[in-house]
Image: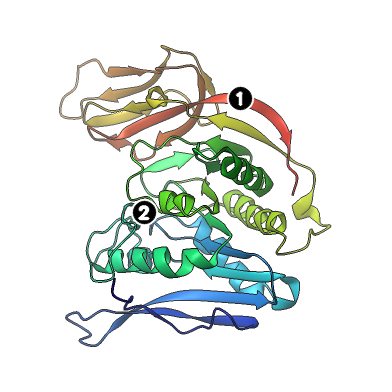
Amino acid sequence: MRASPIQPTVDFNADGEQHGFLKLPHSHDVSAWGAEMIPITVIRNGEGPTALLTGGNHGDEYEGPIALSKLAATLKASAVRGRVIIVPFMNFPAFRAGTRTSPIDRGNLNRSFPGKPDGTVTEKIADYFQRYLLPLADYVLDLHAGGRTLDFVPFAAIHVLPDATQQARCEAAMRAFGAPYSMRMLELDSVGLYDTAVEEAGKVFVSTELGGGGTATVQSVAITERGVRGFLQHAGIIEHEESGRNAPRTTTLLDMPDGTCYTTSEHDGLLELCKDLGEMVDSGEVIARIYDAKRTGAAPIEYRARRAGMLAARHFPGLVRIGDTVAVVADVLERGIPVTV
């Protein structure tokens, strides 16, 4: 396979703090010899594990970019044992546009792995992560939120893996992240996921969903910052801090065992959610109504929970289209689990 066209302006093996770019040549109408310049920070101090931290896999999710931008500006090599690679805006074209997918090729980076070195801009970014960055990493944290179309209770997440030992290591890292909720997440389609690429490479991998609505809150950013440090402490890359950020806290373990967790809209219209995030629902209980916005006088369509559990995710905008996920109900496995790193 041909080499990637992406060239880093940082040296991954050099000690110290480096701030540079992944330079991806991109010829277009307003820049014939232009490039997509994806910001990257590498902080290294001698031998030790490597953590790869990413945000902006989708361009309209902001907790990760905010927390990782702050970390890149403040983390010193003297505080690190090993190496931290920080990419706050993984799909940089999408991030600049504030959209889930790239405005250049409509590529969804999180569905583009393993990528192609001679493919679209999005496929080239995926290929570089797959072949050049993932082999460097021992621990991988990919920070997501709901973007403009979903909202979540704040959770860190792993998947159920065929390798029980690898899953146990991922679950320990998830708990160390210390979000209010910790999810064993079910993907409806895992083909092309960054998650899948990382897991198949045998790495310790944690993802998140930390809010939504196309914005970030003071609380969601605080959860993210605290979680990133907990993840790095668990990896043995930074020391445990005696501060308010590490005050005793707990997490609630959630599970999405099968497709009945998802409620999918079969109609277009005006959405009324009947439960708030974090509330418990009974099987068969009405969780949403959809009104026909083209006429008055018609009864709404009722959507009922297909299982009992907690409302962990919901559609965000007030209008819904056929095929949209309206709600996700997850099983509550255990409350009050102490967070340890």
Q: State the residue at coordinates (46%, 75%).
A: 39
Q: Residue furthest top?
A: 284
The x and y percentages for residue 232 are 67, 59
- Please say if 147 is above or below 266: below
Report whether 290 appears left or right of 278.
Answer: left
Front residue (pair 288, 7) = 7
Front residue (pair 94, 156) = 156
Q: State the residue at coordinates (50%, 39%).
A: 161
Q: State the residue at coordinates (49%, 37%).
A: 162
Q: CA distance from mark 1 to mark 2?
A: 28 Å
- Please say if 72 is above or below 113: below
* Res 245 label: none
Q: State the residue at coordinates (51%, 49%).
A: 207
Query: Which badge, 1 or 2, comes first in the chain's sequence?
Result: 2
* Res 110 label: 2
The x and y percentages for residue 301 are 26, 18
Question: Which residue is disc 1 drawn over?
Answer: 333
Tag 1 and tag 2, C-beta contact below 8 Å: no
Residue 323 placement: quadrant: top left
Front residue (pair 135, 146) = 135
Q: Residue furthest right?
A: 242
Location of the N terminus by quadrant is bottom left
The amino acid type, in three-letter code, at marker 2 is: Asn
